[in-house]
Each structure stands twice: as structure tokens, then as C-alpha cells.
């Protein structure tokens, strides 16, 4: 019997003491040494929830909330990944800021049921987040236009005074 553990997402070999997959970053749980995973997947993760592309299941308002959701998912054997949402704040340096919680496609339905999410909430979570670079560019263009109008009004008023 082959005792190598495999990542349930990318199927790469996992080191025995690894906390996450080196290839895709999927977090893993360590089981007691006497536990043998008959399926070859990481212990405590249910193989039926481990397939498919990652899908955003919800957006947490802070790191603590994201970790709570991730813990609930892990208790049910659903693998999950938490990442910082795109934003203008310093969310990467602090525990504040939005966090996206992703699960594999095969675990979306179970995660939705566990977290009591409606299909509408799931669709909202998977909606494309606005690009912060575009928003910043739009603000800068607006400021430039406002400065141009102010300059034109000032130049126009100095001609007639």
C-alpha cells in the first residue's frame, strides 16, 4: 500500500509534516500518527469535496471571520483557502479587511448548505469584484478634469476683469 499523501486539489505529493500544499497552497490538517488515510488524501478532508476549480463561497469582513468560516468547513471535511480581497487598505499587513473564502467546485454545495447561504448569496460572492486600479484611474481623471475647468474659469475671468 502506498502511504504517500496527495493534495486533493492538484494531486501533488505532500510532505508528511506539511501544513499546506507547496504547489497550490491548499491548507492541510495533520492527523494523529496512528491514523492512515485509506483514500490517499490528506486526513480529515473528504475526497468527494476535493475536486474541481476553486470557487469563492463567501467574503468575510475580517481575518477572524474568515478563519471561523474556514474552521467550520474543515470540521465537515471541506478544504478551503482564504485570500485577501482586492482593496485599497492595508489588509495584507493587518487582520482587518475583506477576505475571500474559496472551496473546490465539488464542495460548493456542501459548503453552501453548511453556511446556510442562499443561491443568490453564492452568486453575489462569485460576482466579479471591481478593479481598484480602474477606480483609482477614474478618480484621477476626474480630478484632472476639475482642475482644467477651474483653470479655464480663472483664465476666462481674468480676461474680462
Image: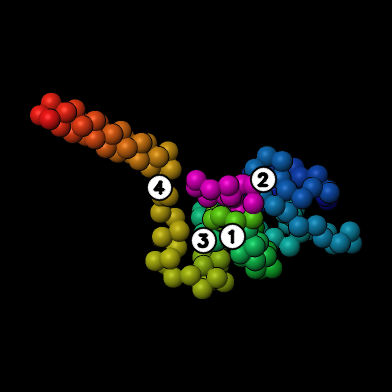
Q: Which mark identifies residue 130?
A: 4
Q: Residue furthest right?
A: 34
Q: Is residue 133 left or right of residue 90?
A: left
Helix, strand or loop: magenta stretch: loop
Quadrant (top left/top right/bottom left/bottom right) for the C terminus:
top left
Distance between mark 2 and mark 4 Cα atoms: 25 Å
Query: Marks 2 and 3: CB-CB under 8 Å?
Result: no
Q: Nearer the viewer, mark 2 or mark 4?
A: 4
Residue 124, image x and y in percent?
A: 41, 60
Residue 152 horizontal/vertical position (percent):
19, 30
Mark number displayed over residue 25: 2
Q: Tell me which residue sits at (84%, 49%) in the image.
A: 17
Which of the two discs, 2 and 1, labels the residue nearer the N terminus?
2
Front tag of 2 and 1:
1
The CA distance from mark 4 to mark 1 is: 19 Å
- Residue bearing mark 1: 62
Which residue occupies the foreground of this view, 97 or 49? Answer: 97
The residue at the point 38 percent across, 42 percent down is: 135
| Viewer can see residue 48 | no
Query: Crowding near pointer 1: few (<14 within 10 Å), some, many (20+)?
Result: some
Does the stretch in magenta take in 84?
Answer: yes
Amino acid at each position: 500500500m502506498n502511504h504517500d499523501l496527495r493534495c486533493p486539489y492538484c494531486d501533488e505529493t505532500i510532505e508528511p509534516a506539511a501544513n499546506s500544499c507547496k504547489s497550490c497552497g491548499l491548507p492541510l490538517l495533520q492527523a494523529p500518527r496512528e491514523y492512515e488515510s485509506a483514500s490517499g488524501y490528506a486526513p480529515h478532508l473528504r475526497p468527494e469535496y476535493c475536486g474541481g476549480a476553486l470557487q469563492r463561497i463567501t467574503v468575510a469582513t475580517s481575518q477572524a471571520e474568515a478563519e471561523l468560516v474556514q474552521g467550520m468547513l474543515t470540521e465537515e471535511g471541506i478544504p478551503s483557502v482564504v485570500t485577501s480581497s482586492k482593496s485599497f487598505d492595508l489588509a495584507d499587513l493587518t487582520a482587518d479587511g475583506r477576505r475571500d473564502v474559496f472551496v473546490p467546485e465539488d464542495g460548493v454545495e456542501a459548503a453552501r448548505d453548511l453556511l446556510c447561504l442562499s443561491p443568490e448569496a453564492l452568486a453575489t460572492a462569485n460576482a466579479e469584484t471591481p478593479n481598484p486600479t480602474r477606480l483609482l484611474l477614474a478618480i484621477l481623471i476626474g480630478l484632472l478634469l476639475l482642475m482644467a475647468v477651474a483653470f479655464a474659469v480663472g483664465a476666462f475671468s481674468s480676461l474680462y476683469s
